[in-house]
């Protein structure tokens, strides 16, 4: 879906750079998550605590994005 959405919205002239700009945050998050999860778990003392912290962060990010779009 992302591939066709980029091409439909902005055309194919600079497709690679535009698509790369969208893919970069996802790629960075996927690369760092194996290190961030255990680091947060060590900081809060358990993996259950880490899951709670990550859930709060996810809700805050979604709420912030939703507030900005409305």
Image (tube, helix red, strand yellow):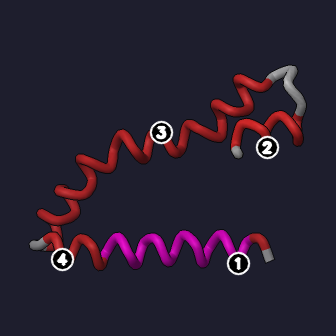
At label 4, counting other C-alpha atoms closer than 10 Å, the crowd grade (few under 14, some 14-19, many 20 or more) is few
Q: Secondary structure at mark 1?
A: helix
Q: Are marks 4 and 1 in contact (CB under 8 Å)?
A: no
Badge 2 vs badge 4, beta-carbon distance below 8 Å = no
**Local SS, label 2:** helix
* Residue topped by disc 4: 48
In terms of image quadrants, where is residue 6? top right
In the image, taking residue 40 as reference, residue 58 lies left or right, namely right
Instruction: Please report contact status of discs 4 and 3: CB closer than 8 Å, yes or no.
Output: no
Q: Which of the marked residues, 2 or 4, is nearer the chain's N terminus?
A: 2
Question: Does the magenta portion include 64?
Answer: yes
Q: Position of residue 26 (x, y in %)?
A: 51, 45
Q: Earlier in the sequence, mark 2 or mark 3?
A: 2
Mark 4 or 3, nearer chain start: 3
Secondary element at tag 3: helix
Residue at 77% in and 26% down: 15
Q: Which residues are magenta?
A: 53-68
Spatial CA span between label 4 and label 1? 29 Å
Q: Disc 1 versus disc 3: distance between alpha carbons?
A: 25 Å
Query: In this rendering, which labeled residue sits more in front, label 2 or label 4?
Result: 2
Secondary structure type for disc 4 = helix
Q: Quadrant of residue 11?
A: top right
Task: Estimate the spatial distance between the alpha carbons at disc 4 and disc 3, rounded to whole Å.
Answer: 25 Å
Q: CA distance from mark 2 to mark 1?
A: 24 Å
What whole-number distance in Å separates the C-alpha atoms at marks 2 and 3?
18 Å
Q: Which residue is under mark 2?
A: 5
Which residue is label 3 attached to? 27
Query: Which class describes the residues within 10 Å of circle 1: few (<14), some (14-19), or many (20+)?
Result: few
Whole-Å distance between the Cαs marked 2 and 4? Answer: 37 Å
Q: Tell me residue 25's x, y (percent).
A: 53, 44
- Residue at image position (70%, 45%) is 1
Task: Look at discs 2 and 1 and give the one toward the viewer.
Answer: 2
């Amino acid at each position: 879906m992302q591939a066709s959405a980029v091409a439909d919205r902005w055309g194919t002239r600079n497709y690679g750079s535009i698509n790369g700009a969208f893919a970069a945050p996802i790629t960075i998050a996927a690369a760092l998550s194996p290190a961030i999860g255990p680091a947060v778990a060590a900081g809060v003392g358990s993996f259950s605590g880490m899951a709670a912290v990550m859930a709060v962060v996810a809700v805050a990010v979604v709420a912030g994005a939703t507030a900005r779009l409305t």
